[in-house]
Structure formats: structure tokens, C-alpha cells
Image (cartoon, grey):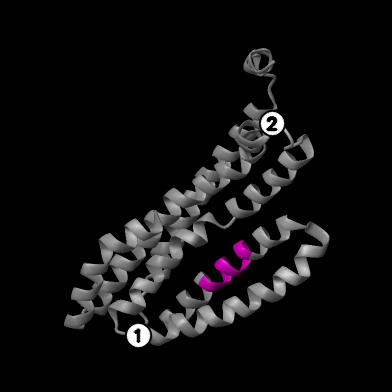
Amino acid sequence: LGVAVATVIFPALSLHAARGEFHQMGSILVLGLRLVWFLALPAGVGLILLADPIAHLLFQRGAFTVEDAERTARMIAYYGSGVWAYCALPVVIRGYYALGDGTTPVRVGLGIVGLNFILNLVLVWPLGEAGLALSTSITAGLQVGLLAVLFLRRHRTLVWRQLGHSMSISSIATLLMGLVGYGFLQLPSPADELARRLWL
């Protein structure tokens, strides 16, 4: 999703950057981030909600035990919490590329790699393999935030109010979706018994 949006908006970003039309460039970049947030946030929440059934359905068989499925579900959920960041990162980086600034994303990326390594060491002990997934999601979010702040400070082309308004609406809608989805997951399903019989 993030790569697709970034690829679509990059020609327009480059065109406005070459013409010195930084306000228009910022509007397009904000549009890309709004679209990513609108789609990636509910996708991530949905992945968190469905992590357990997905892990059990796809992996729990043979030597792959219930405990293994639960551990896998935790990893899926932690990775799901960073879906929005994974998708937003290519969009923000394209903003730098459009301005001919390839150095800043690389420097920030190198720092994030180091931080990710440290968090891996810190989180792997209490959380096991799920700590690696959580570390990746945390550092991806930090990378997006840092690149966005640096972009604003150096180029001042992001319309934060418009972006914040759109993100707020999407977040509220996603919260409602998550609550409804969680409620449905708590209901007993006739499909559970059917699936059990078919599996046996």
C-alpha cells in the first residue's frame, strides 16, 4: 500500500519541487499520508484482532502446537501495530527524494537500525520472539515521525492541521471498527464446531 501510494504521487511531488511550488508539493504529500492512514490503520487493527484465529487456522497442525500458534499470534499482532508506519514510510521518503535530499533518510535510517538492534536486545528477553516484532513496529513509527518533523523544519511544506484532522476522523472510525470487531469475536460461532468436525 505505502509503495503504491508513494509511486503514484512521486511524479507530482517531483514536478512541484522542480518548479519551486512547495505548498502544492506539501498538499500532495499530505494527501498521500492521509490515504495511507485511512487504509493502513484499520488494516493494522484488523490484523491485531484476527492475529489469533489466523495463526491457529494457518499454522496449528502436526508438530505446530497450540502454544506455538499463540506465540505466532503475538508476533502477528505486534507487527500489525506497525502497519501504518510501514506504509507511511515510503511516502515520507519520496518527499525527500523529490527535493533531491537522499542523505537525510539514509542518516535517519542508520540511526533507526541501531535503535532497533538495541530494542531487540532489550525486548527479546521478556517477550521472546514477539519482542523483535514489537521493536520493529516501534522503530518504524519513530522513523516516520522523525522524518516528518525534520521535513517540516527544513522545508515547511506539510499542512499539519489538515493531516491531523483527517487522522483524527480515521482513528475514531477505526476505534469503532475495532470495538465492533472485538465484540463479534467474543460471540460463540457455529462455524467453530463445524470446523472442528471437518478437521477431525
Magenta stretch contains residue 116: no
Q: Nearer the viewer, residue 161 or 189?
A: 189
Task: Tell me which label, 1 or 2, sits earlier in the chain.
Answer: 2
Report, in whole angstroms, how far the alpha carbon at label 1 lies from the one at label 2.
Answer: 49 Å
Q: Which residue is mark 2?
A: 61
Residue that protrudes farthest toward the right in the picture: 126
Q: Nearer the viewer, mark 1 or mark 2?
A: 2
Q: Which residue is mark 1?
A: 101
Quadrant, the C terminus: top right
Q: Main secondary structure of the magenta part?
A: helix
Magenta stretch contains residue 141: yes
Residue range of the region highlighted in magenta in the rendering: 136-143
The structure residue drawn at horizontal position 82% and vertical position 64%, both measured from the top left corner, is 125
Q: Nearer the viewer, residue 16 or 127?
A: 127
Q: Secondary structure at mark 1?
A: loop
Q: Is residue 111 left or right of residue 192?
A: left
Q: Work out whether 143 lies above or below 9.
A: below
How would you rate the neighbour count of disc 2 (Cα within 10 Å): few for under 14, some for 14-19, many for 20 or more?
A: few
Q: Look at label 2 and name its amino acid.
A: Arg
Q: Position of residue 81 (x, y in %)?
A: 60, 54
Q: Nearer the viewer, residue 43 or 66?
A: 66
Q: Nearer the viewer, residue 74 or 56?
A: 56
Image marks 1 and 2: residues in contact by CB distance under 8 Å: no
Total numbered labels: 2
The structure residue drawn at horizontal position 21% and vertical position 68%, both measured from the top left corner, is 12
The structure residue drawn at horizontal position 77% and vertical position 35%, both measured from the top left corner, is 66
Q: Look at label 1 and name its amino acid.
A: Asp
Residue that protrudes farthest toward the front in the picture: 63
Q: Secondary structure at mark 2?
A: loop
Q: Position of residue 58 (x, y in %)?
A: 60, 34
The structure residue drawn at horizontal position 68% and vertical position 12%, both measured from the top left corner, is 197
Q: Work out whether 178 lies above or below 39.
A: above
